[in-house]
Amino acid sequence: MSNCKMAKSTDWKKNISQSLKLRNKKERHEFADLIESQNKLFEQVASLKTRNMQLTIETERLNGGGGGPGGSEKVALLEQRLWKLSEELTEMHRRRGEVGR
């Protein structure tokens, strides 16, 4: 095979490879912010689920402990915090659903 034919056979391969790399770079860049936001939301959801579980356990512990001075106030406060966290989690799921559309 002559040098001219070898050069032509590798040129088209290089051109295709470069075109594919450029296309990949452009397409990934367009979605990078969306993917980053999605990852942050997943982290926040996981964190809120953990916190929710901790508060639920603490509430059960306080309710099961028979109370004590100020026990009902603590339970009310924890229930209020639990309710707020549940609302935040619901809102995050709603936003995640909107982003997915």
Image (spheres, helix red, strand yellow):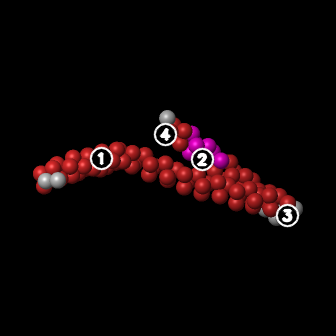
Provide the residue span drawn in magenta: 86-94
Instruction: Mark 1 vs mark 2: give the one in front.
Output: 1
* Magenta stretch encompasses residue 82: no
Above or below: residue 56 compared with residue 90: below
Please, what is the three-letter code of the amino acid marked with disc 2? Glu
- Whichever of callouts 2 and 4 sits on the residue coming sooner in the sequence is 2
Above or below: residue 97 compared with residue 56: above
| SS for dot 4 | helix
- 3D distance between C-alphas at marks 1 and 2: 42 Å
Q: Nearer the viewer, residue 47 or 30?
A: 30
Q: Which residue is mark 1?
A: 20
Q: Is residue 48 left or right of residue 10?
A: right
Residue placed farthest to the right in the image?
66
- Whichever of callouts 1 and 2 sits on the residue coming sooner in the sequence is 1
Percent position (x, y) of residue 63? 83, 58
Query: Circles 4 and 3: CB distance less than 8 Å?
Result: no
- Whichever of callouts 4 and 3 sits on the residue coming sooner in the sequence is 3
Q: Quadrant of residue 57?
A: bottom right
- 3D distance between C-alphas at marks 3 and 2: 29 Å
Instruction: Mark 2 vs mark 4: give the one in front.
Output: 4
- 3D distance between C-alphas at marks 1 and 4: 28 Å
